[in-house]
Every structure is written in C-alpha cells, then in structure tokens.
Amino acid sequence: MRGFAAFVALCAIAPLVHGVMQSLKARLQGRPGPSPLQPYRDLAKLWQKETLVPGEGMQLFALAPGFALGSALTLAAAVVWAGHARPPLIDVVALIFVMALGRAAVATAALEVGSSFTGMAAARDAAFSVVVEPALLFLLLGGAAAGSGTGVEGLTPDRFDAASVTAITAAFLTVLAEAGRIPFDTHDTHYELTMIHEGLSLEYSGSSLALLHAAAYVRQASLFILVGFLVPPIAGWWTPAAVAGVIAVVVPIVENAYAKARLFAVPQLLASALVLAVAAVALRFPGLWPR
Amino acid sequence: MTAIARIGGTTAQWAAVLVAATSALVAAGGWAPSVIVGTAPLPVLTLAVHPTPLAAPFLGIVAFVSGAVAVWADERGRTHGGWLTAAFTLAMVCVLAAASIASFILFWELMSLVSALLVATHCERRETRRAVFAYLATAQGGTFCLAAGLLIAAVHAGSPLFSEISARAATLDPVSRNWIIALLAIGFGSKAGLMPLHFWLPRAHPAAPPQASALLSGAMLGVALYGLTLSLLFLVRPVPTAWGILMITVGAASAMGGAIYGAIDRDLKRVLAFSSVEYIGIATASIGLAVICNADGEATIAGLLVVAVFFLLIVHAGFKALLFLGAGDIARCTGTTDLERLPGTRNLSPDLRALIVIGAACAAGLPPTAGFVAEWFLIRAAVAGVATGDTALRIAASVEVFAVVVASAASVTVCTKIAGILGASNGERAAERLARGKPSAALLVLGGTVILFGFIPMLAVRPLLQVVRSSGLTIADLPSSLPSLAAVAASGAFLAGLLGATIGRLTRRRFVPVWRCGSPPSSGSRYTATAFSKPLRTMLAAILPTERRRIERAGSSAWFPRHIHYRTSNRYLIDDAVRAVTAAVLRLTRSVRIVQSGSLRLYLLYTIGAAIVVAVVAH
C-alpha cells in the first residue's frame, strides 16, 4: 500500500520536477521564466484540445504514446518498489528492454508519419540508442558484478570507492542523454534541424501529445531516482529521492554552463559514458585491481 | 503431370514434417533406438542413427519451420519445389539423428546440396547463380573441415560412433584436440554464417525463394548450432579456455556486426540475413561462455546457458520463418523487397504488416514477444557468470552481455526501420489502400507462437530443461522470475499501449494532412531506409565505409548539369577480404596451369625428366 502511494506520488510530482528545472534555468538566465506549475497547466490544456491525426491507416502512430507512457510507468514502478516487491517484479535487465520498447514505438511512429523532420529525429535517436542502451545496462550491472543480484535495490554500494564514483559519473552523463538535456539535446529549441526528443513528437497534438509529455516527465524523474540508487546510502533510505533532488538542481546549472554539443560530437560524449560504465563494472571484479 | 508433381510435392512435404515431428517426440522421450548399419569391411563407413535428447529441440524446430513452410507454400500455390523442400527437411532430420561420423558427413553433404538446389530455384538470374556458387564453395569447404576434424577424432577413439568418441574424449592429446576443435568450428561456423565466413548469407537469401530462406535461416542454422554444441560440450570435452575466449570474440563480433550491417541495409531480405548472422553470433558466444564456465568448474551456469541458447534458437526459428515468409508475401504484393521503394506501397494488407512488425519486434527483443524473454534469459544466465568465478570468466561474461545488448539495440533500429517504412503514409487515405489478400495461416500461427512464448515462456523452457538434463548436463536454478517477470514487464508496457490507443480513440479526433512543420509535401522529403541509417553510418564511418557515386548529365555547360544522380552503397570489409582471397586463389591456379601447356614436346620432356629422376633415386 505504501509502495502504491509512493508510485502515485512519484507520477504526480514528476511534472513539478520538470517545472522546477525549467523555472530555475530561466532564473539563472535572468528571465522570470514560467511558473514551476506550468507542466501541469500544459498537460491540462493539451488534454482538453482536439487531437489531430495526420493521415489515416497508421497503426502505430496511435499506439506509440501509450507504449511510451507504459514503459515510463514500468520504470517508475521498478524504482519505487525496488527491493519491496515479493517476488521481484522486474530486474534491471528487463528494464532496459522495456525502455527500448517505449523508444522504438515513438521512433517508429515518427518514421511512419512520413514527415522529414520527425524522420530525422527518429534516425538520430535510433543511432544514439545503440550507444546509450549498453551504457545503461552496464551501469545497472554494477550490482550484479558486486554479487548483490540484478534487482534495482542491489545497485546501491555500501561506500564511496573508485567503482561507485565512476558509475555515478557515467550515470549522470547517460541520464542527461536519456532525458534529452544539454549537451546532448535541448527541450527549449524550436529549430527542427537540431532537436531529437522534441522532434519525435512534432506531428502529435491534443491528448496524445499530453500522454507523450507525461511519459517524458515520469521517465526523467524515475531516471534521476535510478541514479540515486547508485549512491551509497549517505542519507538513509531516502538517499535516492534526495539525490534526484540534487540532480534536478544541478542539471539547470549544467544546461547554463555548456552549449549543446555539435550533433556528431554527441556520439563521442556517449561513448565516454559507455566506457565509464564498462569501467565501473570492471572495477568491481575481484583480483583485477588492488583494493 | 505437373498436377501429379504438385500433389506429390505437398504430400511429400507433409510426410517429411511428420517424420521430423515424430523423431522430435521420440528423441525427447529418449525412446529412440540406436540403429547401426553395415560395420564391415571398413569400420569408418559405419552408418549409425540415434536421435539423442540433445537433438530433440532442433528436430522440433525443423518440424515446426517446415510445417509452416508447407502451409505457406500450399496457400500461395508454390508447390513446385515440394519434393526438394521435403528432401531438405529429411536431410536435416537425418543430420540431427546421425550417431556416427560417416552418417553425419553423408547427410550433412546431402543437406548442403539439396539446400543449394533450393537456393538455385531462380537460376536464370545471374546474381542467383553467383550466390549459389558462393554458397556451394563455402559449404564444400565447411564439409571438408568437418570431415577432417571428425576423422581425426574417430581415429583417436578407434571408433566412428559419437558415443565412443565422446567417451574417450578426455584422453585426447592437446595437439589433435586443438586441430579437431579448429576444424569443427570452421565447418559449423561457415554453415551457420559466423562473421568472417558469413559472406554467402546476404547473397543467398535475397536470391532464394521465401520457403528456402525460411528453412535455411530458421532450421539449418539450428542444425549447425546443434553440431557446434554437440562437438564442444560432448565430443571433445574438456575444451581449453582459449577456445571459449576465441568463440566469444568471434561470436560477439558476429552479433554486433550482423546487427549493425542489418541496421544500415536497405533490402528487407538482406536485413533478415544479417539478423541471422547476429543470432548465430549470440548463440556461438554463449556456447563459448559455456565452455569457459565448464573449464572453470561452473558447470551449472554452462547448463543454464545451453538452455537459454536453445530457447533463443527456438524463438529465432519462429520469428525468422515469419519474417522470411512475410517478406515473400510483401514481394508478391508489391514486387520488391527494397525498403527504399516500399513506403506508401498501396497494396500491403494491414494484417500482414502487423505480423511483420511483431516478427521484427521479436528479432529486436522487445516486449511482449518471446524475443524479449529469450534475450533477457540469456543475459541473466551470462550475468550469473559476471557475478561468480574467476576474473577471466567475469570478463568473458561481460563481453557476452555487451555484445548481446549492443546487438539488441541495433536490431531495435532494424525493427523501427522495417515497421516505420512499411507503414509510412503516402498522404493517401486508407480507403485507397488496396488490402489485397489476407496473411497466410502459417504467418498467423508463427506470430501467435512468438507472442505466446513471450507470455508463457515455460511452455518451451520446461521441456528444454528436461532434455538438457537428460543429456547429462547439470543446470543452475532458473532465474526465479522467469515465468512471471517477463509476462509482467511485457503486459505492463503492452496494456499501457492499448490504453493509450483507447484514450486516443475516445477523445475528439480529426484527420488532417501531415504537418511537416509547414513545408509542402513531396515524395523526396520523406525519410528513406538509407536516410534513416545515415547517422549510424556517420557515427561508425571507420568500420562502415560507404561508396558514393555522382553521375552528372551535362546541360548547356559543365557548370549547369541537367541531372545529378547520387548512388550510395555499403562496402563490406569482409567481402573485400574474401574477394582478395578468391582473386589470389584464381591467380595461383592460373600460374599452376602453365604446367599444362598442351604441347606434346613439353609432356615428352616431363616423361624423360621423370624417368631420369626415378633412375637417379633408384640408383
């Protein structure tokens, strides 16, 4: 019951997390910016609007927002119920495939619609995912390498050491990429040639767009909490939530400090995240490194 | 006469399916008798047949795929190859049942030749003849290696029976053990399409008819992997760790390379051929990992890996047959399998497309299909290796996990490409799409199976456990969540998708033209398969060289051309290497041919020379 309450709370707070980040970013840039509650207003507005469907006979276009929301909610459930569900509902390996389902559905819909801009975004997203997915999996395999199983709760190390610091760094980079943040991508652009995550939703409107946005908010908040699981429990059982809060503050600062990377510099950044993630697993192998 | 051949062909096909299914059941139950034919005068030529429990899953695969092919061929009126298909099925059954080296090589060769004949159905086309030639050359080389390897093993054991060879494997000396392993790995690897020896696959599949492709890729790949498992885990055990590491390396390269080549290709059937390269890579790497586990005393993890690989191959057979037969239907409806020409094809039935999307999602390991459960199971089995054992095993297991997840991510790209391109709207209204024909019952059954195994994987895994246990391997505990977890993950995301669609239907909707950010519609602005893979090709430019050609048609002056055509084609480094090797062999044979000048005087000179040499040596 407590788990369910926490799950509902996470989904309810997720848009607020996005709103706070956007508002903080605006303040840092010297703009008044939108209210932190703006995402809720956006969702309510989109929900009431009419849905425009481009072209008939497209089967996946209508399904994709649901798949995206479903995979985000599964991720949220996995981080909320980590270590509490008996038997464990889902492990980190399955999580990767569930997230891939959401991504693939949205990219397929973008390609299906036949617009050049959505197709461009789908192509880029698909190419980058070839690097992001292994990075995510290796981040989440740290627990298994340390001998504490493949559950999300097994990810938490007991102290700061070379492996956990490497893992946290890699996780931060990967999550920036997954959440579509600078230097990988940006939510604020309206320039079609540069955007990836926003580009995928160009042809959506009304309630389907609301579902896609809700999915993005929930996924972002859950990913932040997932990074929190990689941090040793310095603040008791609510460390993951606290770390998620810290990330929500740090990300706007990073977004102001850096420019968006050139498109084909992104794979190099992603590759460095991947190398760090693999190193984090290798650092846990006994006998390979002096401790 | 043709009518008789037709009816006979269908009957023969069903008879072969029946034989395969019966032998699968008999083998699984362990009731199969061991039949030995003709021991004297040459013991090496003993023909023995004994379907063991280990072969049962593969016999099942052969029965399943050839049954689907028979239904499909019957519905589509493609029964002229019925006798060949039946012969191919029977040859595969015999290979799986073979219990001595002579019968194994005999049936293996038969299988190669019959499958080459099947590929050569459309031999009036030049590229088909070239593909058949490449396939035959590889197959003959492979058979030679197999025969040599098995003969060395038989000579050592003093018996041509697999049971005897297996019993005396522990006493092999290291040199012949390494030779046997190398020869068998090359033989089975070339048949399966393992990476450096895969070059014939992407040529053969586009040239072959759909039934042949489905059988080659769905069933024969399994037969090759059965051979690899049999030889490495039984015939020549214990296998040194170095071979396990080599197989993981080759398998990982094959898995990742196959998936990435598939992601950048534009022909549907070639994409599917590369997907086979990917899956055989994953399977080989896993067998390699099992070898390392065995060498490290982690035999239970090895057993678990074998079960996971067998399950993966069953699933692979299901979706690969579905995709190849579906590609055949696409070619029938639209006249092409070139993804560049497919978008907006008006006469592709939505049901057919939905089935193809299910198959592609299964190949990509997306929930709720069986592909997801299979890849998850395999990764979990490998992760057990990451968590225990010594450092070499842990590194090997990490490499395996890495390869599987990269391959899976790249094949998600393939799935996106196929699903997106097949459904790409042309701007026309749905009513204008001529949904010609309904998908074959075979496709429905195959699609249903891969979904069913996604939700209830234990239907296949439980018999596999029994079969692998009864062939003498010990198996670690299954991941406790295998029966339920996959279904939970799958249904969570899947039900949410349906929910989203329902919400979309309930809210106010209006059909409008595609927005395209306000730019006017034109067929040239649509994203094509080549455009879709462009970012990936740019990212991996070092290993995926692209050849670009610009053809200009001059107008009034060279500065103002009337037309410019751009042609882009992928260059495959391994194909270049194979071409270089072929050229070198041809050069060598040409230079040797100088000896045979055809001049009488030269031959007289040879005779005199030979006589002198003999005289000198005799003296």
Image (cartoon, rainbow, N blue to C red):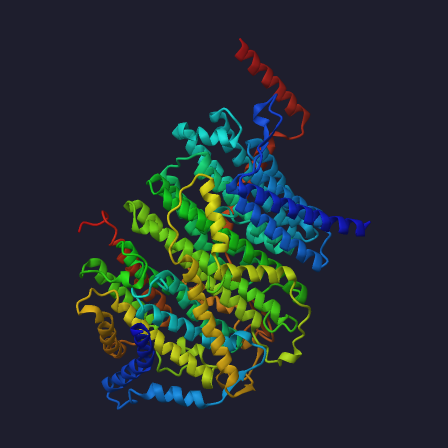
In the displayed structure image, the side of residue A231 where residue B167 appears, left or right: right
Q: How many marks?
A: 0
Q: Position of residue B491 (x, y in %)?
A: 45, 68
Which residue appears farthest toward the right when viewing the image? Answer: B1
Of residues A110 and A15, the one nearer the viewer is A15
Q: Position of residue A179 (x, y in %)?
A: 34, 74
Q: Position of residue A226 (x, y in %)?
A: 29, 68
- Residue at left offset 42%, top offset 73%: A70
In the displayed structure image, the side of residue B410 where residue A143 appears, left or right: left
In the displayed structure image, the side of residue A99 where residue A225 appears, left or right: left
Please tell me in which quadrant of the rendered image residue A67 appears.
bottom left
Please tell me in which quadrant of the rendered image residue B344 appears.
bottom right
In the displayed structure image, the side of residue B293 where residue B158 appears, left or right: right
- Residue at left offset 61%, top offset 47%: B21
- Is B534 above or below relative to B91? below
Residue B79 seen in the figure: yes
Which residue appears farthest toward the top when viewing the image? Answer: B619
Residue B543 seen in the figure: no
- Residue at left offset 54%, top offset 10%: B618
Of residues A234 and A261, the one nearer the viewer is A234
- Is B432 above or below relative to B241? below
Of residues B536 and B553, the one nearer the viewer is B536
Q: Position of residue B152 (x, y in %)?
A: 49, 29
